[in-house]
Image (spheres, rainbow, N blue to C red):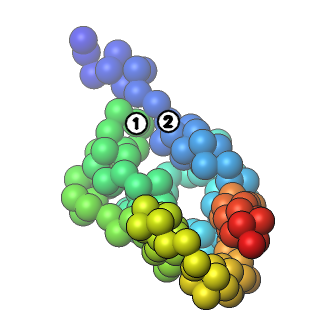
Amino acid sequence: MNSEARREHREPLGRRVARYRADRGWTQQDLADRLAMSRTAVSHLEAGMSHPSERTVLILSGLFAVEPPEFVEGTLYPGGKAERLPPVAARHTEFEMQFRLIEAEISLAAYLEVHDHRLLRDQWIERLDLLLVSAQGVGDKDRIVNTLRELRSAH
């Protein structure tokens, strides 16, 4: 297969970004907030009107929990830029880390069959209420609200 034919079989990176974003239930504004860019810039990226910088690809990779080379593999992202990408990306925001810690504590209490964990439940609710204030995007807020609902109904 010649290089032109191989190029035709590659996906535009913007289309991949749009698919990953949609899979997470994020709007373009949700992604823009996470990237510290405008919604219009995200729209242009997804439409293929611009190629993201290596820095933006690194952040996107972390947000979507995939390594940078894997994220751009099989796309039309420029090869020279792809070669400069680091092999790994940080994957967890402070929000994600805190939410997962709370989830782990709840699961551990259930596993250990802690019957009277009212104090723990009250602490989890307080921490989740604080986390809700800093949550970005509908998906993150929904995760917290659903967990809060479950905790509060267990009273």
Q: Which quarter of the figure is the N terminus placed in?
A: top left
Residue type, label 1: Thr
- Residue at 50%, 36% (x, y): give it: 12
Q: Is residue 97 left or right of residue 20?
A: left
- Residue at 61%, 49% (x, y): give it: 24
**Between 63 and 59, the one nearer to me in the picture:** 63
**Between 1 and 98, the one nearer to me in the picture:** 98
Horizontal and vertical percent position of residue 87 = 22, 58
**Between 5 and 114, the one nearer to me in the picture:** 114
Horizontal and vertical percent position of residue 77 = 40, 44
Q: Is residue 33 left or right of residue 69?
A: right
**Between 118 and 75, the one nearer to me in the picture:** 118
Q: Which mark is residue 75?
A: 1
Q: Residues within 10 Å of mark 2 (few under 14, many from 20)?
A: many
Element carrying mark 1: loop
Residue to which mark 2 is pinned = 12
Q: Residues within 10 Å of mark 1 (few under 14, many from 20)?
A: some
Element carrying mark 2: loop
Q: Is disc 2 in contact with disc 1, using a CB cutoff of under 8 Å? A: yes
Task: Give the vertical position of 22 relative to 120 (above or below).
Answer: above
Task: Give the vertical position of 127 relative to 22 (above or below).
Answer: below
Q: Is residue 37 left or right of residue 141?
A: left
Residue 89 is at least partly visible in this image: yes
Residue type, label 2: Pro
Q: Earlier in the sequence, mark 2 or mark 1?
A: 2
Q: Is residue 10 left or right of residue 45?
A: left
- Residue at 43%, 62% (x, y): give it: 111
Indicate the quadrant where residue 155 lies.
bottom right
